[in-house]
Amino acid sequence: MAKNIGGPTALEGVTSSVSSFRNAVQLLLALGELMPFKTYGRVVACLIGITCELCPGSAGFSVEPQSSTSVILISVDTLRADRLSCYGSRRAQTPHIDAMTRGGTLFSEVSAQAPLTLPSHVSLLTSTYPFANGIEDNGEQLAPGAVTLATVLKLRGYRTAAFVGAFVLDRRFGLSQGFDVYESPFDLHREAGRDPGEI
């Protein structure tokens, strides 16, 4: 069940703060208010944010965007709704998420299609059940060419980015399909030995 909790004017402050990928990264890093992570190695929760911006006239896009709506999807493993102030927690202080929910849609009921991180996220991003997409366990790989939410948004003129904080969602498992940017702390080994100017 979804509840529309704001109009276009309520979202203006948030969308202006997500006007570039760099700003989107800063916004998603600010979402670290959810849990105190000391190191990526101790990350239990996974954060995947899909920030999409319209980019009419971009090379390779002939489809005219149908609206100027931004899409931000935040998924945090093992985070209960009662730990977010937008869902009524009086102890939690999550002002950045609260600001986004004031101008967007806040879901009051959500069902995961699988009890594991990768299969659940593949279902979420492909709109298919685990038995249909073939991903029923962590460590499996999504088939190349699978149609993802990022792929569909990109075809409609959006730029897409994901910022991942859980190893089970690393690009090697196929969820990076369709994203312009797919950043994961586990990609750092690929950058070792490269000239900093190339990165």
Image (spheres, rainbow, N blue to C red):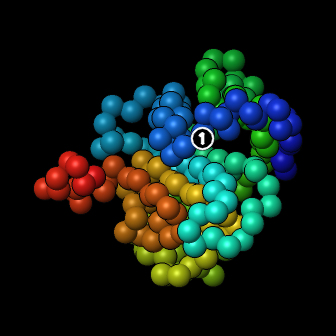
**Relative to 25, is 66 on the left or the right?**
right
Tell me: residue 94, above or below residue 175.
above
Residue matched to label 1 = 19
Which quadrant of the figure has residue 76?
top right
- Residue ID at (59%, 63%): 58
Residue 180 location (% of width, % of height): 50, 61
**Above or below, comparing residue 115 to residue 146 in the picture:** above
Left or right: where 16 falls relative to 199: right
Q: State the residue at coordinates (51%, 58%).
A: 117
SS for callout 1: loop
Vertical side of 74 occupied by 182: above or below: below
**Residue located 20% across and 48% down the image:** 196
Could you tell me residue 81's position as x and y percent?
Answer: 68, 36
What residue type is disc 1 on?
Answer: Ser
Q: Residues within 10 Å of mark 1 (few under 14, many from 20)?
A: some
Q: Nearer the viewer, residue 86 or 31?
A: 31
Number of numbered discs: 1
Q: Is residue 117 left or right of residue 193?
A: right
In terms of depth relative to the viewer, which is nearer, 176 or 43?
176
Q: Is residue 163 visible?
A: yes
Q: Quadrant of residue 113?
A: bottom right
Of 51 and 111, the residue lying toward us: 51
Q: In the rendered image of this protein, does residue 126 appear above or below residue 88?
A: below
In the image, farthest residue toward the top: 91
Q: Residue at x 47, y 41 (%)?
A: 22
The answer to whether residue 114 is visible is no
Question: Which of 70 and 40 lies nearest the eye of the viewer?
Answer: 70
Residue 165 coordinates in the image, percent (x, y): 42, 48
- Place residue 155 in its image quadrant: bottom right
**Image spot of residue 106 (x, y percent):** 77, 41
